[in-house]
Image: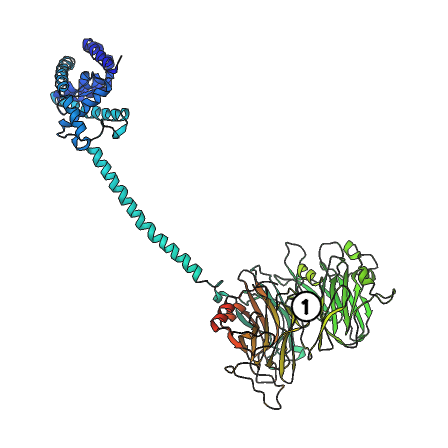
Amino acid sequence: MTANSKSQDAVGQAQLQPAGQLDPLISAASRRRVADQSRINPGSIRGEMAAALSRALKLPGKKGSELGEYDPLTQADSEDESEEDDLVLNYPRNGLGRDGCLGTGSSKMRGGRSGRLVGAEDEAQEDEDEEEDEWRERLPSKSRQGRDEMKGVQYWNHRDSGRDRMGDDRGGPGSLGSAGLGVCSSDVEEKRMRTKNIIRTAFFLVPVVCATLLVLLCAFLIPCQKGGLGNRPQWERELGDLGGVTPPALALWDVDGDSLEDVFLGVTECSNDTHCTQGNKIYSAVALSAASGQVLWKKVTRESVMYIQCGLQFSSQSSPVCLLIGKSVLMAVDGTTGEDLWSVLLKNIEMQTVLLPDLQGDSVPDLLVATLPADEALDLSLTLISGQTGAKLGHPVPFNLTGQGKLIGPMLHETQQGAYYILFGLGNVEAISLSDIYVRATGELPITQPLRKNDSTWEALKKTNTSSFIHIYRGSERVEFLLPLVAGFGNNHNSLDTASNLNNTKCEWVLVYGSSKLSVLRQSDMHKKWTFKSPPIHRQPTLGHFNNDGVLDLFFQHSANGIMTAQVIDGADGLLLWTAEFACPRPLVEASSISTSNGLSAFVFWAGEPIKAQKNVTKATVAPGAAAAEPLIRKLFLLHPVYPTILLELTSTTHTTVTSSVSYQENQKDASYITVSSRPTPYSEPGARIVKSMSLRAAISKGQIIRLGESSKTLEPIKPSVFELNRFFRHLSFKNQ
């Protein structure tokens, strides 16, 4: 049975059924709404009854021939025919045809169904008249106006629902049954809005993409300098009243947690401003912030502070401990606050302390101190001290040394077999096992297992079986300096850091003897690898990488007849790599080496005007008979191996610099150059001490290029331009060695 036949049967049954039997099919709400509206317009009751009857029977509706009329009982065709009828009946009522969207196809369809349309409208008109009579009998009070209004509302509701239902059944708005003028207008409007949105998005994205490409292009073509040079910590502070050429105690260590090494300095002041005597001197140790130069704490001592060492740790959570070393007292203070931790009294302390491995099993490194009584010049004593409590471990161990000259050591050395030895001497170098010192001091064997080891190779170097000494160097010429062949040793030799000290104990040594000879000693058999002869060397050599062979090279200075000569010696074979002469007397300050980002080291040193300078540089003139006079202006130079014929003048001063050190700044890839100098005065009294911190990268950016004469070892076919030199030095960065 087709949908058309089912619809006709339903209509026939509805016509035969009495009006009273249709009451249950009509909801009470609908009757009340119809009744209320009929009071306003009784003429609309007929349309309302027809709509309600259609909803009750759930029959598909059919639109009448006039706008606002709807007949549910005349819908008897199939679904396809009803859709075609909708095409014919709906739009002519609104005065609109459908040829605008459907073209010729719609016109044929309308013409083919014209005869059926007239018959359907007549049947619908008769059915509506019968239904209107029945509703009038049941609802006599309904007004005509209410019926007309209700009929209009139901017409538009059924019309919209019928369109939606036919659109779903026949494939949506794109089918012939639902295509109309409104749909065409909507499609055109949608295309226009889509095009407008695309244009608007393009106008937004194109400038953004162009700006991004421009920023990236500038980032690659214009490299920025690493960090702002103006933000580097640079400061200057006056501390103390006594100047002169005696170097004060100086140490570096971070105690305030800002990742910058703070400055510790021994200070001497006078309570009487007019005249300074031994009775009115005040001695103290001062901690200065590396960032601003402000005083963190000040500790007054009863005697002059000769050495300051920092970095001893009691535990991983504790504050670093600093040692203040005087002539007869060794004091440990909290590095953050300066409070006393412990102190020990000794006699005639000669050198700074030596950091030892743990001797007691308390997980804290212990210390060794060398004392040399004035009345017994050859009796050197070594004393073991607990690093945690400051108590003496046993009694001092004396050694009767033969020789004269400068005290060498003591120094700790760890052999390849893991045995520990102490190196010391007067004009020569001796070694003795650390376990032997511990047994002599306490009368007991060491508790920790590593201290019980002995190196068979070193023990075989003893001259006799009864002797405890191992001869490292004995000769007719006195030893001036002995230092481990480790980069940065001169810059950080006052540190009590365990890691850095262990590195210093596993290497060969640089030996300076006879005031004019340099040698490198092998730690395996104590033989000299090479020897270099030079004029008298007055300062400890500085170690750094001048070439790419991986072996540390040696920078040192010597002076005679008012001329200072600076030289660099190859650490692998002792050959001369670089030399230059300056108008300067005997140097007072050791040079410093700083590791750079390209793997080589930069050397920083104080000197006068270069003698082998080009014509555009003013040459230093020395008056006859005054060759040894100090120049009024002293200059700080930087030498980098990439350009050996170029010096960069960082700064100049009339102050007399007496000591210096280098502090690294890992975050900024920079280094601070710390100097302690004496300010000259027109009187015979020494001037005040000036402490200054200077950023090396900031000084390099303002430095002056000085060209030296061409060296026979470093001939360059083309001289570097000023632009090339400025670009190289200003992009130079530093790192910890």
Q: Is residue 194 above or below residue 503?
A: above
Q: Position of residue 565 (x, y in %)?
A: 63, 79
Q: Quadrant of residue 388?
A: bottom right
The spot of residue 90 in percent (x, y) is 17, 26
Q: Quadrant of residue 118?
A: top left
**Which of 5/650 is in front?**
5
Residue 127 % position (x, y): 15, 14
Residue 149 visible in the current orientation = no
Dot 1: element: loop
In the rendered structure, the answer to whether residue 437 lies left or right of residue 278 reads right
Decide which of 196, 136 is in the foreground and name it: 196
Q: Is residue 165 visible?
A: yes
Q: Judge by depth and name the residue closer to the eye, 26 or 523.
A: 523
Q: Amino acid at mark 1?
A: Ala
Please give the count of numbered marks on the rendered protein: 1
**Of 428 and 402, the residue lying toward us:** 428
Q: Residue at x 53, y 77 (%)?
A: 707
> Which quarter of the rendering shows the C terminus?
bottom right
**Occupied quadrant, residue 85:** top left
The residue that label 1 is drawn on is 572
Relative height, residue 622 to residue 488 (above, below): below
